[in-house]
Image (spheres, rainbow, N blue to C red):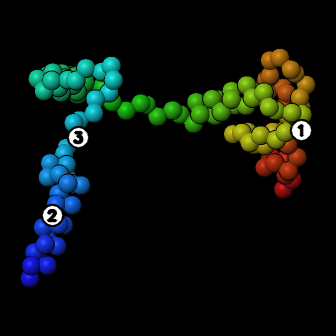
Amino acid sequence: MLLASFRVLFAALVFGGVFPPDATAQVEPESEQPGEPRMSREQWLADIEAARRRIEERRREGRSFAQPTPSDADVARESFQRILEDDSLRAGDIVATSRGLLMFKGQSSNERSLNDFAQSHGGPQSRSP
């Protein structure tokens, strides 16, 4: 019995010295971004209220928060503009457009236009019935 009590006392001293009681209950302080002042609760609530007023104003005016959906013509125009500005195009490259498959002829090196492309053979418009 004395030996068991000695072991308990020894374990308490060893682990008590390795793990002091306050070491396991430490809580790290909140980390703040360097250079950014911490916002007070009052400022945060004021920002929330200002945002709610802006939202309500937009609703009363009937304005939408979502960006308008581009038309198919706008998407096609933007896509073809990207093709015209693609510096990696080489003669014989095939591109898919709303007009079908087009082959880059590679004739112009400065300003590209629709004239720099030819209808690709085997495309939907070049098939015979």
How far is mark 1 from mark 2, CA to CA?
Answer: 82 Å
Image spot of residue 46 (x, y percent): 14, 22
Left of 89 or right of it: where is 1?
left
Q: Residue furthest front?
A: 2
Image spot of residue 32 (x, y percent): 28, 29
Q: Secondary structure at mark 1?
A: loop
- In the rendered image, the quadrant that contains the C terminus is bottom right
Residue occupied by mark 3: 28
> Contact (CB < 8 A) between labels 3 and 2?
no
**Which residue is at the front of the view, 73 or 34?**
34
In front of the other: label 1 or label 2? Answer: 2
3 or 1: tag closer to the N-terminus:
3
Looking at the picture, which amino acid does disc 2 mark?
A: Ala
Looking at the picture, which amino acid does disc 3 mark?
A: Glu
> Contact (CB < 8 A) between labels 1 and 2?
no
Looking at the picture, which amino acid does disc 1 mark?
A: Gly
Looking at the image, residue 101 lies above or below residue 49: below
